[in-house]
């Protein structure tokens, strides 16, 4: 018995895709991977609306949007990040940036590599993020007289 499966949606109809321009957008399916270079900003891949992949999910059946700022894998030091090498991002971007540690470093063929987690903005998001629990007890606790 074979199971009929609907084809994946194109990027324009995918829950993980965010439109930038008429036929272009960004795929937010995967969290950034660690790098072997320090102080790198994560750039999500751009795709055309008509493209597709095997991991696409119809936007109507799944909605993502958990921001990095709300994710358990994201850390934002007070004042943001202050890199020596800002790369292609202005200092104002780094002030709202934090580190995404969703993925562990992958093994390599070279001994002793150093891993660095990539920076994302507090307003970025991906489908692999997990919303951190809010401290419900502190939020609902009545003030002491």
Image: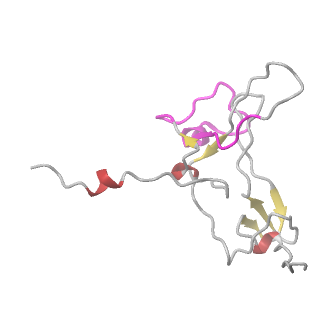
Left or right? Give the position of 133 relative to 107. Answer: left
Identify the residue shown where x is 58% and y is 50%: 68
Front residue (pair 90, 9) = 9
Residue 19 position (above or below residue 46): below
Query: How far across and how far down the image is residue 86, in percent?
Result: 68, 32
Q: Residue furthest left?
A: 145
Front residue (pair 26, 93) = 26
The scheme the figure's colours follow is secondary structure
Residue 86 position (above or below residue 20): above
Left or right? Give the position of 63 relative to 79. Answer: right
Image quadrant of residue 64? Answer: bottom right
Magenta region's main secondary structure?
loop
Image quadrant of residue 20? Answer: bottom right
Residue 55 position (above or below residue 86): below
Q: Which residues are magenta?
A: 77-105
Q: How many marks?
A: 0
Q: Is residue 89 magenta?
A: yes
Identify the residue shown where x is 35% and y is 55%: 136
Query: How far across and how far down the image is residue 137, in percent?
Result: 31, 53
Query: How far across and how far down the image is residue 44, in percent?
Result: 75, 51
Query: How far across and how far down the image is residue 95, in percent?
Result: 54, 39
Identify the residue shown where x is 72% and y is 64%: 16
């Amino acid at each position: 018995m074979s199971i009929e499966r609907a084809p994946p949606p194109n990027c324009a109809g995918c829950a993980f895709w965010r439109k930038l321009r008429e036929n272009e957008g960004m795929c937010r399916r995967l969290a950034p991977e660690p790098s072997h270079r320090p102080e790198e900003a994560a750039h999500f891949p751009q795709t055309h609306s008509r493209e597709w992949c095997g991991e696409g999910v119809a936007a109507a059946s799944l909605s993502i949007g958990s921001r990095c700022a709300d994710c358990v894998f994201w850390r934002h030091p007070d004042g943001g990040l202050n890199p020596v090498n800002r790369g292609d991002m202005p200092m104002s971007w780094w002030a709202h940036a934090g580190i995404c540690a969703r993925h562990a470093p992958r093994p390599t063929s070279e001994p002793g590599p150093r891993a660095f987690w990539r920076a994302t903005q507090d307003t970025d998001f991906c489908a692999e993020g997990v919303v951190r629990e809010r401290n419900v007890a502190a939020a609902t606790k009545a003030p002491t007289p």
